[in-house]
Amino acid sequence: MSTRTNVLMDEHKIKELLPHRYPLLLIDSVHEFEELKRVVASKFISEDYPVFEGHFPNNPIYPGVYFIESMAQTGALLLLKNDKNNANDVVGLLSSVESARFRKPIRPGQTVQYDVTLEKSRGIFYWFSGKAYCETELVADAKFSIALTKKIKEN
């Protein structure tokens, strides 16, 4: 997988669907979208990203758990962009991680692409497989599920 230049959704459009905000909005563009099948998104890993203050200050490495959260956010976008699901009323919550592998560390200045595929669904649960790439190299992969639940309304 190479760095994607076509942008179907930018960060502003992503924020219309996902509740996440800086510093935990972990995708900044969407490059491919097949309704309820597959989505490809990416994130540029900036050197001033707050996580590098503690992970690790003299040897900054993007945390593995951020790959999983990024894949989950990408999968949630696939669900929330679907006409059946109203992003104003529901939220996608990570409900399981069945397997995850971290193959190569990512450092500031690199772009990570997330390729997430919906494998099956049942009720409010959706199972995905996700892969993270830097340039053409697979750097992480995981199988996980998301539960679509109603948002809690503030009084």
Image (tube, grey):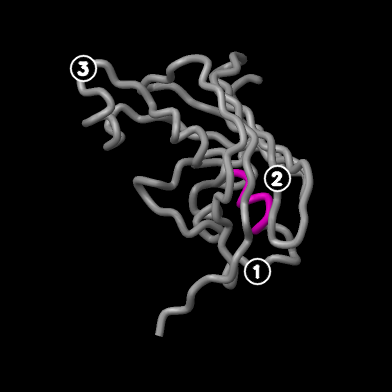
The residue lying at 58 percent from left, 57 percent from top is: 92
144 left or right, relative to 55: right
- Using the image, tell me which numbered label, if any, was put on residue 26: none
Q: At 65% from the left edge and 32% from the top edge, which residue is drawn?
A: 115
Give the main secondary structure of the magenta stretch: helix
Instruction: Specify few, some or many for label 2: CA neighbours under 10 Å numbering under 14, 14-19, or 20 or more.
Output: many
Q: Which residues are magenta?
A: 74-80
Mark pair 2, 3: CA separation:
37 Å
The secondary element bearing badge 2 is classed as strand
Label 2 and label 1: CA atoms lie apart by 19 Å
Badge 3 crowding class, 10 Å Cα cut-off, few under 14, some 14 to 19, many 20 or more, is few
Q: Mark 2 sits on what residue?
A: 127
Residue tagged 3: 58
Helix, strand or loop under label 1 = loop
Task: Give whichever of discs 3 and 1 has the lower sequence position.
Answer: 3
Q: Would residue 138 be found to the left or right of residue 19 on screen?
A: right
Residue 39, by quadrant, is: top right
Quadrant of image for the C terminus: bottom left
Mark 3 belongs to which amino acid?
Answer: Asn
Name the residue beneath numbered marker 1: 86
* Location of residue 116 (image quadrant): top right
User: Mark 2 or mark 1: which is in front?
Assistant: 2
Nearest to N terminus: mark 2 or mark 1: 1
Out of 99 and 73, give the one closest to the viewer: 99
Q: Nearer the viewer, residue 107 or 119?
A: 119
Which of the image's four quarters has the N terminus?
Answer: top right
Q: Nearer the viewer, mark 2 or mark 3?
A: 2
In the rendered structure, which amino acid carries the disc numbered 2?
A: Trp
| Image position of 86 with respect to 132: above or below | below
Question: Where residue 59 sits in the image (x, y, percent)?
Answer: 26, 16
